[in-house]
């Protein structure tokens, strides 16, 4: 009951934010100079353009168009990506590209956490020692290293100079798993690098605070080995912030993969956005950007809610 | 507690700092790099380099340390040193102007929202949340592709693109800094001295200027430095996607042009990439230093 009320209290603002954001997006799209239908198929005939304007609701004015788009998306019709003399169904495009992007993001998260957890624990344990100072400095420096610069430098070193992997391309895992993983190494590394630094810093801060708790001294004085104390007694309570931030990053990363996908020519949702902007596909742009912001808001709301359920201290007083 | 600025700032509990944050080597390197970039941006024209947009057809794609081209040339014969100097100017102008204007507007909206509360605050928070619900890059991508619309028949001019880019970045910055300003101003606005000033009959904007702004400024300043870094990244990403500043006029744009020649003249890629990376990192170091330094006063109370 309590949780249900909390859920509602979050879902209503979330829903209104999504509605207003997508409405503003369609307003933005209507600001494009010229007739949007003509922009979408510049070489099409007038009849084709009129038909498209009718089909997308572009002939109905701003509110009519938005309502048409909104109700279509709500009923599962995501619109079309128009080509000269044909179209691609956006629902299909999303079904094809979203898993690729999610895979990329999940790989990056796994790699980042694999590096960040031991490093964060070790550098907190050795707080102030040389190891910690070096790790902290390196992490502070690399956290802000732009992923696209990293991507280009990686492909320069590993693909062009050393020739270990192909610089661009994508193979689906069902087709050839080995080749898939090999091609994903560079994009995943470029994304994971900055993430890992951020996570290490977060975990280090929390672990340092936890290490000062009495029960840790207690555990250590019982003669439990340091390694066990660190993993069993310290890591678990310290990992909340880390996991929250990892979950929050999911939404932001969908936007952040646009450049990486474009550099490595990976057919994900980011590449599709880039492509639809280049081709001035008004409807596709709106649907895909809306999808990303819905995902972003949804993730944030869910994480917020989950932390409240799991950690009673953060619950609102009144509820 | 060691005197290292990193370890002392990152503990979860506010630690009472009795010493100044240590100026680490990173701080000096960051200041040196920012000064160098600023110098190049302002006085780069005194350097004896060729014009950045004039190609030399004898020296196509030469490697760095060539006698007449210190950082080499691009595959089309443009001098790298001149391009980097010109890129510094564009990147620095774009990011500083965007952060200054965006930060100013954002702080004003954020502080007034926190001070006056009510419906105004509700509306501002709502708008900030909406704008923050679209990732930075996607928002500026959408804004830029619509506002600087160009096709084969009427290509958008360089000036127009730069102006539109700055406007899009300002729109991106406003909610980021606005939310920080609002959060900080909410805390300070409920302090006793504000109430005291109010009860003595001070005017609202006098209180904001005299009591709230000076206290909120450090937080805004620190985040502002970080924002310069992220604006440079967004600018680079946009150029890389081909809708930012065209023609190798900014660092990101140099990357976009050089990507295709990565096999023949790798310096076309790694030089601008490192410039962007160093600048972003330096601004972050700087912002962190400012944050620690200004934070100290509060912890002493």
Image (cartoon, rainbow, N blue to C red):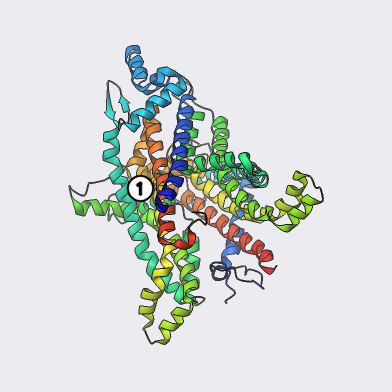
- The x, y position of residue A282, in whole percent, is 40, 27
- The x, y position of residue B9, in whole percent, is 57, 67
The quadrant in which residue B118 appears is: top right
For the point 20% across and 52% down, the residue is A177
Q: Is residue A128 left or right of residue A270?
A: right
Q: Is residue B68 visible?
A: no
Vertical placement of residue B191 versus A217, above or below? above
Q: Residue furthest top?
A: A47
Under tag 1, what secondary structure?
loop
Q: Is residue B229 visible?
A: yes
Q: Residue furthest front?
A: A1
Q: Is residue A97 left or right of residue B175?
A: left
Which residue bears the numbered disc 1? B263
Q: Residue furthest left?
A: A175
For the point 46% across and 31% down, the residue is A23
- The x, y position of residue A261, in whole percent, is 35, 44
Vertical placement of residue B31 versus B23, above or below? above
- The x, y position of residue A1, in whole percent, is 39, 51
Dot 1: chain letter: B
């Amino acid at each position: 009951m309590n949780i249900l009320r909390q859920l509602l209290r979050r879902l209503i603002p979330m829903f209104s934010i999504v509605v207003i954001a997508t409405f503003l997006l369609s307003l933005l799209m209507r600001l494009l100079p010229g007739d949007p239908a003509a922009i979408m198929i510049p070489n099409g005939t007038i009849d084709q353009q009129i038909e498209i304007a009718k089909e997308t609701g572009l002939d109905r004015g701003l509110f009519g168009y938005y309502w048409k788009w909104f109700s279509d998306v709500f009923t599962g019709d995501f619109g079309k990506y128009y080509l000269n003399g044909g179209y691609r169904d956006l629902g299909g495009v999303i079904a094809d590209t979203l898993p690729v992007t999610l895979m990329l993001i999940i790989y990056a998260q796994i790699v980042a956490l694999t590096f960040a957890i031991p490093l964060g624990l070790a550098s907190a344990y050795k707080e102030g020692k040389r190891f910690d100072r070096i790790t902290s400095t390196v992490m502070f420096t690399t956290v802000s290293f732009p992923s696209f610069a990293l991507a280009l430098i990686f492909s320069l070193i590993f693909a062009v100079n050393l020739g270990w992997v192909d610089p661009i391309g994508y193979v689906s895992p069902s087709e050839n798993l080995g080749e898939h993983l090999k091609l994903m190494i560079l994009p995943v590394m470029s994304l994971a690098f900055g993430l890992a630094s951020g996570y290490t810093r977060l975990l280090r801060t929390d672990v340092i605070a936890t290490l000062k708790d009495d029960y840790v001294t207690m555990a250590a004085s019982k003669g439990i080995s340091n390694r066990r104390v660190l993993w069993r007694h310290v890591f678990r309570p310290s990992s909340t912030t880390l996991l929250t931030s990892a979950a929050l990053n999911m939404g932001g990363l969908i936007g952040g993969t646009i450049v990486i996908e474009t550099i490595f020519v990976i057919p994900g949702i980011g590449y599709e956005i880039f492509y639809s902007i280049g081709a001035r596909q008004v409807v596709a742009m709106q649907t895909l950007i809306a999808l990303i912001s819905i995902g972003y808001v949804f993730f944030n709301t869910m994480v917020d809610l989950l932390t409240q359920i799991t950690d009673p201290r953060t619950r609102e007083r009144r509820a | 507690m060691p005197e290292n600025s990193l370890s002392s700032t990152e503990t979860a509990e506010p630690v009472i700092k009795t010493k100044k944050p240590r100026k680490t080597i990173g701080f000096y390197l960051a200041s040196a790099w920012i000064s160098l970039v600023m110098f190049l941006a302002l006085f780069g024209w005194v350097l004896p380099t060729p014009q950045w947009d004039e190609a030399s057809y004898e020296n196509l794609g030469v490697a760095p340390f060539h006698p007449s081209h210190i950082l080499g040339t691009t595959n089309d014969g443009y001098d790298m040193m001149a391009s980097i100097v010109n890129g510094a100017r564009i990147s620095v102008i774009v990011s500083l102007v965007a952060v200054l204007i965006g930060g100013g507007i954002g702080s004003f909206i954020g502080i007034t929202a926190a001070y006056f509360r009510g419906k105004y605050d509700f509306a501002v928070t709502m708008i900030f949340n909406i704008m923050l619900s679209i990732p930075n890059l996607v928002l500026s991508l959408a804004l830029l592709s619509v506002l600087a619309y160009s096709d084969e028949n009427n290509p958008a001019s360089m000036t127009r693109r730069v102006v539109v880019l700055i406007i899009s970045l300002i729109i991106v910055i406003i909610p980021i800094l606005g939310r920080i300003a609002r959060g900080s101003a909410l805390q300070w606005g409920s302090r006793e001295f504000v109430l005291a000033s109010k009860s003595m009959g001070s005017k609202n904007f006098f209180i904001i200027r005299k009591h709230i702004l000076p206290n909120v400024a450090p937080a805004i300043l620190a985040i502002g430095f970080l924002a310069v870094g992220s604006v440079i990244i967004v600018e680079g990403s946009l150029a890389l996607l081909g809708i930012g500043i065209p023609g190798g006029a900014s660092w990101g744009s140099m990357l976009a042009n050089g990507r295709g020649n990565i096999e023949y003249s790798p310096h076309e890629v790694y030089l601008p990439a490192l410039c962007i990376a160093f600048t972003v990192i330096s601004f972050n170091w700087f912002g962190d230093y400012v944050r620690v330094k200004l934070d100290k006063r509060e912890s002493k109370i």
